[in-house]
Amino acid sequence: MVEIEYRPWKKIVVHEVKEMSPKEFFEGLAAVAEAQKQGAAPAVNWADGIAFVFQPFPDSDRVLGEKMDGVIHYNTLQFTRTSFQTEKRATIGGRDYIIKMMKGEGNADFMTLAKFLNGLKPLETSP
């Protein structure tokens, strides 16, 4: 019989963190979907008041070696502070877009990321 082993990530390294206002965050996702002509609604992760997306580094020998050692690197992590809704709407050029939100509360890594992001100084908004 085959042996099954579970190896969770040991470490997540985030190289750039960018907090955005909810409007900027969701409109940015809509703009990317429009530019890429995606047929499906874009989706974001949500945990503990934080909606976020991340871009991992492309796989290379070094990146794959790190992954095999339990370390994952995110090039950029963009986030906004917002309440959970199954869908958020954004308008770009008069066209409405739906952005799906997926609860990540069952994912320990996402909860740890949300805790880290919640600990950062909140984005200052103009009066």
Image (cartoon, grey):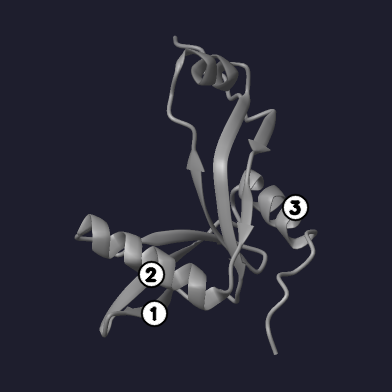
Q: Quadrant of the N terminus?
A: top left
Is disc 3 in contact with disc 2, using a CB cutoff of under 8 Å? no
Is disc 1 in contact with disc 3, using a CB cutoff of under 8 Å? no
Could you give the CA–CA distance between mark 2 and mark 1, rounded to whole angstroms? 6 Å
Q: Quadrant of residue 58?
A: top left
Label whose residue precedes the other's in the sequence (1 or 3): 1
Callout 3, which amino acid?
A: Phe
Is disc 2 in contact with disc 1, using a CB cutoff of under 8 Å? yes
Q: Which mark is residue 116?
A: 3
Left or right side of 47 for 44: left
Residue 29 pos. (x, y %): 40, 64
Residue 5 pos. (x, y %): 57, 19
Q: Residue at x 59, y 52 (%)?
A: 106
Label whose residue precedes the other's in the sequence (3 or 2): 2
Q: Quadrant of residue 75?
A: top right
**Residue, disc 2:** 99
